[in-house]
Amino acid sequence: MTVFDELMEMNNAYVEEFASQGLSHLPARALSVLTCMDARLHPEAALGIRLGDAHVIRNAGGRASDDAIRSLVVSQRMLGTREILLLHHTDCGMSSFTNVELAAKIETDLGVDVGEYDFLPFTDPAEGLRQDVETLVFSPLVAGGTLIIGAMYDVTTGTVSEVLRRTA
Amino acid sequence: MTVFDELMEMNNAYVEEFASQGLSHLPARALSVLTCMDARLHPEAALGIRLGDAHVIRNAGGRASDDAIRSLVVSQRMLGTREILLLHHTDCGMSSFTNVELAAKIETDLGVDVGEYDFLPFTDPAEGLRQDVETLVFSPLVAGGTLIIGAMYDVTTGTVSEVLRRTA
């Protein structure tokens, strides 16, 4: 049995209790959350986000990558969101390696030379959060007037703490 | 009061009940889920994924973008995941516009000419899912032997249905 087969059993129970028919495809709270893929963070649960409330965009590190900005553009222009929460977290794996180290591991494990690939690690988590907020603030693709809040999630306590807020 | 301020109140309640200290940063079920940012989909709830179980990567459309593959490489090489669930959903906003239409809207709304930017929309959801599974299967950065399952989530019922499975 694969992990997926186990998840399908859980989904059967979810469907039995499902009572959220008829939600709009426009997020009810006009919010986008950009955060990390980390397994110890369930953003909807940690923030009380209900089904239909908010877009949730996740990648390694919760970085303001070009693809995250692609998603935010779709979210804002096509689906009406107006506020962005950028949520990083403590003990992030993205500060445990350098591009050179991961490239070397890929060459060893997979036999692939990725060259100068930027995996978007960061050395200082606080600085990484600030940089990503600034990237969003100054992106011409993020609507002027968008409130952007940078916050940290503590994986040992579940606590979300605001670090900075800016307006695009 | 911003939406974020409301979420912080919800987070206080979450912290009171938090009892998941000491989780490993390595996902317990060695699973990565790649899915859409859609507000009507809460992947952890729909699939019974517990805190610490799985990486969750989300973008507009749940596309196998370069940035999603960056995240999957970190997930597999640095954090030990071995199975990938690619989960698209019904009524996806990514099939409601073309690149030309969104570029025109950005020019009108934001005064920015994005040129030939590919926002990764799809015309046929079933074909989009199949394409993204194939992209992962043939990516040299996804480990050989990885099980990749393509599935659809029905936003009106909460049901997850397997569509195809391949091995990288």
Image: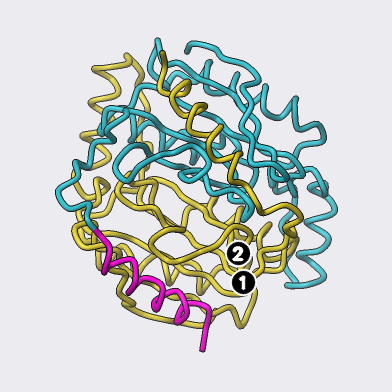
Chain colours: A cyan, B yellow
Dominant secondary structure (helix, strand or loop) of the stretch shown in magenta: helix
Q: Residue at x 19, y 58 (%)?
A: B156
Residue A79: x, y in percent?
A: 26, 33
Q: Secondary structure at mark 2?
A: loop
- Residue A12, magenta (yes or no): yes
Residues marked 1 and 2, same chain: yes
Amino acid at dot 2: Asp
Image height of A15 relative to A9, above or below: above
Numbered disc 1: what chain?
A: B
Q: Residue at x 21, y 34 (%)?
A: B101
Q: Quadrant of residue B166?
A: bottom left
- Residue A54, magenta (yes or no): no
Are the two marked residues, 1 and 2, in contact with CB atoms closer than 8 angstroms?
A: yes
Q: Residue at x 58, y 63 (%)?
A: B54
Please tell me the numbered disc located at residue B29.
1
**Residue nearest the viewer, comparing B67 with B103:** B67
Q: Secondary structure at mark 1?
A: loop
The stretch of residues the image draws in magenta is A1-18
Residue A43: x, y in percent?
A: 51, 43
Q: Which residue is mark 2?
A: B53
What distance separates the C-alpha of mark 1 from that of mark 2? 5 Å
Q: Residue at x 45, y 16 (%)?
A: A147
Residue B50: x, y in percent?
A: 55, 62
| Residue reaching furthest to the left | A22
Residue A77: x, y in percent?
A: 29, 28
| Residue reaching furthest to the front | B16
Image height of B129 relative to B71, above or below: below
